Structures are given as structure tokens and as C-alpha cells.
Amino acid sequence: MTGPLSLRFREELSALGLAERGRPLVVAVSGGLDSCVLLHLLHFSTPEIPLVVAHFDHGMRPTSASDAAWVRGVCRAWDVPCVTGVAEVPVRSEDEARRARYTYLESVVADRDGYGLCTAHHADDQAETVLFRILRGAGLAGLRGIPAERAPGVYRPLLPFWREELQEYASAVGLSWREDATNEHLGFARNAIRHDVLPRAERAVAPGAREALVHLAGLAAENERAWAAVLPDLFERIDLVELEDGSRSFDHAALLTLDSSLTTRIIRNLAEVVGRPLGRQLSGQVVTFAVSGRSGGRVALGGGMEIRRELDRVVLGPTATTAEERPLVILDPGPGSGEAGVGGRSVHVA
């Protein structure tokens, strides 16, 4: 995209399908540079979109209450509705802060009958996220980084823009913001990547490291879209069915006809579908069991989930309650058939 940032921003909003819908768009505003630029762009460049500002106080630093008051003051000056929340118990880590923040923000969307939530993530955040996940050993899916849109209705219209562009815009319009001193603390992993690791990489290894990391995120996203397109056909090949308890059951023999790389991808995807994503260590164990586990065997996945073999089927989902086995007795020496109970399932035997 070329042209003034405000024009490119409107183009990004259009690409994300964000337009005036008669219902408000909730904007997450911390008071920092990024979120203040986001609010300014939305309010002054797209006045047709009704807004509600939401600010969450994590309680992680002494000045957090004054940050909330400052955001409320900006909203009063710009005549934008504003709601604020505060953590009941001060959070102790970046991950806790993120979960608490999104829980609150999504509650504001529901309370205000909003159609979505806008956050101020930008291209530098994307580069930092991808590098962080590389260093932690994430798979290709994790290297997609921050999506421009994710369920339930969370949008990041600043994702194509770099922090430097946002700073230039803020200076051009005379925008002020609050500085968060904790953003300089290298004890936080994200800050160490932002202020130490990435700058060193750009100086000593690859001058275009940030752009390369964002490009990698795009390639990973493209790869995931390709998998999403072919997985339904693979599921059909293994006769995948959903059971009443939400488990997924598939044909063991059909699974063996697939390449091992496809098998691994299928099992990892099904684990995510049933709500139990597999880590690196457990993933290999589960895939091995899916391929070679014997009938009646099972592997616990934790969280009340398991993978088990039931005769010719493999089932992945909630742990099955112990059920009484129901044998089929054929009295005559000749051919016979009937229903037997195996692992809680009724199985036709002939």
C-alpha cells in the first residue's frame, strides 16, 4: 500500500470488512503510542464507525490508575464512550496479563453489543512474535504470528504498519500518549527481543531481519491455508466421524495407507479440534499409538482427553468411562452373528 497512512488505514479497514454497521466497534486503548494512533485514525479518519473505547488496568505498576484516568480524559475530549476495568488480583506475568485483558475486552464487546474488537498490533509486534515463537520451538502454525483477524471478531488493522510509521503519524497530528516504563524492562521476554535481540540481529546478522520475520509469518499463514484446503479430503479418506461426546473416530487401516507426514498432520489437527493441542513430546507418542496401538489400548493426553484403539477404529476425545463388556455367545458350531459390547460401543460380530 502507498499514500498517506490514513488512506492506507482505510484500505486495510475495507479489506478486513470493517465498516459502519450501526453497532459499535470496541477499541482497546492502553494509552500508549500504538493504541492512541489506532483510536485517532478510527475517530478522525472513519467518523462513520461508532466506537467504544475499552481500557484494562492490569495493576502491574503504580501508575496504572493514572493511565486509566488519562485515557478517560482523552475520550471525553474526543467525545468517545469509554469503559475501564481493573484486574481483581494484580497479574504476575505477560501471559496472565494477556489472558485477563482479552477476557475483559471481549466482555465489553458483549455488554455493548459490539460487532468486533480492534487492537493496535503492528508489523514490529508481528516480527517480535514470530522470533519469540521460533526461539520457543513453535511449529509452522505458530509461525503465522498475529492474525489480522481472529474469532470471535478480533481485528488488527495496524498490522501492515511499522512502529516508525505510527510515530511519524503521531508527530504529524500532534498526538500525545503515555509511556509505559515496564516496556523498557529487559526482564520481560518481549522487551528483551524488542530492545536487545532483534536490534543485534539487524546490526550483526541480517539488516532486514524484521521484514524477513514478517515475510515468514505470511509464508506460514499461506501454508496453513493450504492444509485447511486439503484436510477435508484426508478426513474423508480415513472415514472421520464425530461421536456424541465430541470425540473424533477414524478408520485405523485407512490411516496406514497415508504418508507418515500426512498422518502426523491429521492427528495434530484432530487434537486441536477436540481442544487438546499436542506439545512436541506428546505428539510423537500419540502419532505412534495411532499407527501401531493395539485394540483396547489408550494414551492419556491430560485434561480429561485420550486417544484409544477400539478394534478397527481409533478414537480421540474425552476419556471414556469404564463400561461393562458385553460378550456375544454363539452356541452352535456353525456360522453365527450378533451384537457385542466393547469399550462402551456396540459392535456387530459375525
Image: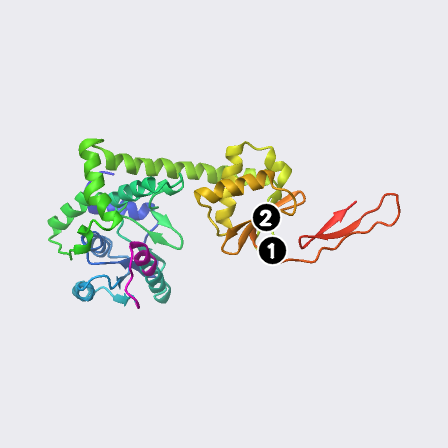
Residue 20 visible in the displayed image? no
Residue at which label 1 appears: 320
Tell me residue 108's x, y (percent).
33, 64
Answer above or below: position of 143 versus 26.
above
Q: Is residue 95 magenta?
A: yes
Q: Residue furthest toward the bottom? A: 88
- Tell us which disc is closer to us: 2 or 1: 2
Q: Which residue: 22% across, 46% down?
A: 192
- Secondary structure beneath disc 1? loop
Alpha carbon separation for disc pair 2 and 1: 10 Å
Q: What colour scheme was applied to this rendering of the protein?
A: rainbow
Q: Which residue: 20% across, 52% down?
A: 183
Tell me residue 10's x, y (percent).
26, 47
Asked which quadrant contains residue 107, the reply is bottom left
Numbered tag placed on residue 298 in the rendering: 2
User: Looking at the image, how many numbered discs can be counted on the residues?
Assistant: 2
Tell me residue 4's x, y (percent).
18, 43
Q: Nearer the viewer, residue 119 or 75?
A: 119
Q: Which stretch is magenta?
A: 88-100
Q: Nearer the viewer, residue 315 or 75?
A: 315
Answer above or below: position of 141 versus 114.
above
Q: Which residue: 22% across, 48% down?
A: 191
Quadrant containing the C terminus in the rendered view: top right
Q: Is residue 178 magenta?
A: no
Quadrant containing the N terminus in the rendered view: top left
The mark that comes first in sequence, 2 or 1, is 2
- Secondary structure beneath disc 2? strand
Tell me residue 289's x, y (percent).
57, 41
Three-letter code for the amino acid on which mark 2 is drawn = Arg
Residue 167 visible in the displayed image? yes
Q: Nearer the viewer, residue 327 or 71?
A: 327
Marks 2 and 1 close (CB-CB < 8 Å): yes
